[in-house]
Amino acid sequence: MTSAPAEPPLLEVRDLAVYFPFVRGPAFRRVHGAVRAVDGVSFSIRAGETLGLLGESGCGKSTLARAILNLVPATAGEVLWKGQRIDRLGEHAMRPFRRHIQMIFQDPFASLNPRMTVGQIVAEPMTIFGLHDPRRRKLEAMRLLDKVGLNPRELNRYPHEFSGGQRQRIGVARALAVDPQLIVCDEPVSALDVSIQAQVINLLADLQRQLGLAYLFIAHDLSVVRHISNRIGVMYLGRIVELADAAELYRRPLHPYTQALLSAAPIPDPVVERKRRRIVLTGDVPSPDRAYPGCRFADRCPIAEPRCAVTPQELEGTEHTVACIVASEKRRGGMTNAEARMSKE
């Protein structure tokens, strides 16, 4: 008896790259290079799963999110929705897929039209996709506002009459208006107070359980990503350097950059906090307009070897993958060059 073929993931990203060319000279406007905002990123998201994407500001997380939704053109690579490629589709052909993939933006103050009422904002996606008649849209907007914890009677108020946390809830309601299967959350709580952040995160988790949603959750806050994610990818300078189950990543980080990030996160236990060893990175983040034959983190890495800067680094492993030849050798039980030299001495 043959087993049924595995269902493809909702979203699959293969070697995605987004380059922004820059020009110089007022007369000829010649292209002198490109900013490699995203450079060879691959991952997949299955139904009901949350993939957290972690990294410092400027590493390419938001550009990656917009490339997935075809809001910025991909330079190379592929984006597939349920096995169907969507990264090369025009605006008209892309529209049916936008119903299944919605987005919650980082800034709740800038992402809502100040000239529209809350009811109009939440109902707008239904209008765009031709869902329901006007009366039903109003009822659906009221239902969605209630679902995200807002008073449905405030349908005719404007965004400026709400707090930051309430505005982000309006953004969540808008994203839910067309019954999506995947929501891309682009740092949805970074502009909010800490107490409000927890409320929005709990709301997203509750909605996921109720509706079976999948999330791509982008953030630079370690605790937020850990709370909501099933798996976590760590980005550095346009590439994913480590990808693993959330609990496994926090328990046993392999990449030196991931280790440095986790060592900087405060722990609410003074005894543990005093015993921890912090990893302080030296130097600045390299320029994203350079091509790197080897590891982009080599100049700042505390365990880097000469070969790291010239050897291509690809994600290795099965469930817990890491793009570091030194970490991969340690995991396999081998001896790194640095350790070999130390043993001879």
Image (tube, rainbow, N blue to C red):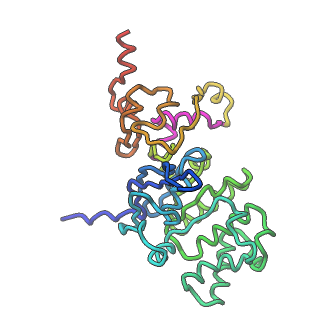
Task: Give the residue at the far right of this rendering.
Answer: 161
Identify the residue at image location x=24%, y=64%: 3
Task: Give the residue at the far front of this rendering.
Answer: 27
| Viewer-proximal residue among 324 and 22 | 22
Residue 294 x/y as whole percent: 40, 36
Determine if the magenta segment contains residue 265. yes
Identify the residue at image location x=65%, y=26%: 274
Q: Quadrant of residue 11?
A: bottom left
Left or right: 173, with 101 as reference point: right
Query: Is 97 above or below relative to 228?
Result: below
| Residue 36 appears in the figure | no
Query: Is 54 above or below relative to 204?
Result: above
Left or right: 162, with 190 as reference point: right
Residue 63 x/y as whole percent: 54, 56
Screen quadrant of the N terminus: bottom left
Left or right: 219, with 314 as reference point: right
**Main secondary structure found in the magenta portion:** helix
Question: Which stretch did the figure color magenta?
Answer: 244-267
Residue 182 x/y as whole percent: 50, 66
Task: Give the residue at the far top of this rendering.
Answer: 345
Identify the residue at image location x=69%, y=64%: 168
Q: Quadrant of residue 186?
A: bottom right
Screen quadrant of the C terminus: top left
Q: Quadrant of residue 269?
A: top right
Residue 39 x/y as whole percent: 44, 49
Determine if the magenta segment contains residue 342. no
| Viewer-proximal residue among 6 and 329 | 329
| Residue 209 appears in the figure | yes
| Viewer-proximal residue among 277 and 22 | 22
Identify the residue at image location x=50%, y=26%: 302
